[in-house]
Image (cartoon, rainbow, N blue to C red):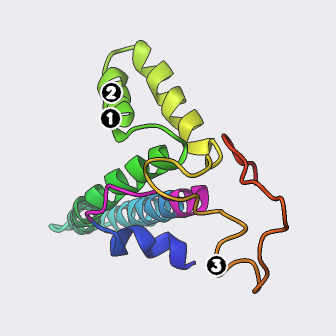
C-alpha cells in the first residue's frame, strides 16, 4: 500500500527506477479516483436534474469535475516521473517515453505507440543499469535475511524475471 503513494513522495524525481508494483499501484490509484469522482459527479447531477425547476442543476457535476481537475493537476508530475522511472527500470531512456507520447498523437500510428508504452510498462526489471541498482535485487543488504550471496554466485546480466 505504501508503494501506491510513493510517487507523491518522489514528486520531482525523474532519475532512478520504479518497480512494476509501484507503477501499477499508482496507476490503479489514479484510475480509482477518476472513476469515483465521475460516479459522484454523475450521481449528483442525476439527483439534481430530477427536479425540473432546480436552479443548481449541474452544480454537483461542476464540483466533482473541479475536484477531478485539481487532483489530476496535482498528480500530473508524479505520474510523469513514475512512468519515466518505470522506463528506466525496464532499460529504456525517459526520452523514449517522450518520443512515444509524441508519436501517440498521430492518428492510427498512435495506437502502436500506446501499445509500445504498455508493453514497456509490463516488462520486468533489468539488472543493474545506468539508472541505478535493480530494485528487486534478492541479495541486497536488507532483503536476504542476514545471509550473504552463495559462494561463486554471479549476478545475472540482462532481464531478471520475478
Q: Position of residue 22 (x, y in %)?
A: 53, 63
User: Is residue 140 part of the magenta span, yes or no?
Assistant: no
Q: Is residue 144 left or right of residue 60?
A: right
The answer for how far apart the CA atoms under marks 3 and 2 are is 37 Å
Q: Residue furthest top?
A: 108
Secondary structure category for the residue under label 2: helix
Mark 3 or mark 1: whose residue is earlier in sequence:
1
Q: Is residue 1 left or right of residue 67?
A: right
Region of the chain picked out in magenta, as a range? 12-25
For label 1, the crowd category at 10 Å Cα-Cα, with few meaning under 14, some 14 to 19 and many 20 or more, is few
The quadrant of the rendering that contains the C terminus is bottom right
The answer for how far apart the CA atoms under marks 1 and 2 are is 6 Å
Which residue is label 3 attached to? 141
Looking at the rendered image, the disc whose residue lies closer to the viewer, 3 or 2, is 3
The answer for how far apart the CA atoms under marks 3 and 1 are is 32 Å
In which quadrant of the rendered view does residue 34 lie?
bottom left
Query: Residue at image x 43%, y 51%?
Result: 131
Which residue is label 2 attached to? 99
Mark 3 or mark 2: whose residue is earlier in sequence:
2
Looking at the rendered image, the disc whose residue lies closer to the viewer, 3 or 1, is 3
Amino acid at each position: 500500500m505504501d508503494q501506491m503513494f510513493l510517487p507523491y513522495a518522489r514528486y520531482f524525481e525523474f532519475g532512478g527506477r520504479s518497480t512494476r508494483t509501484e507503477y501499477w499501484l499508482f496507476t490503479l490509484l489514479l484510475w480509482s479516483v477518476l472513476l469515483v469522482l465521475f460516479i459522484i459527479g454523475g450521481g449528483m447531477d442525476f439527483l439534481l436534474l430530477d427536479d425540473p425547476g432546480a436552479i443548481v442543476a449541474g452544480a454537483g457535476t461542476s464540483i466533482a469535475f473541479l475536484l477531478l481537475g485539481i487532483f489530476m493537476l496535482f498528480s500530473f508530475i508524479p505520474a510523469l516521473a513514475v512512468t519515466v522511472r518505470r522506463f528506466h527500470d525496464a532499460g529504456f531512456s525517459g526520452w523514449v517515453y517522450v518520443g512515444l507520447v509524441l508519436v501517440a498523437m498521430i492518428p492510427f500510428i498512435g495506437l502502436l505507440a500506446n501499445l509500445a508504452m504498455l508493453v514497456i510498462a509490463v516488462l520486468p526489471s533489468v539488472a543493474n543499469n545506468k539508472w541505478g541498482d535493480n530494485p528487486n535485487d534478492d541479495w541486497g543488504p536488507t532483503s536476504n535475511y542476514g545471509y550473504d550471496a552463495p559462494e561463486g554466485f554471479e549476478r545475472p546480466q540482462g532481464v531478471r524475471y520475478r
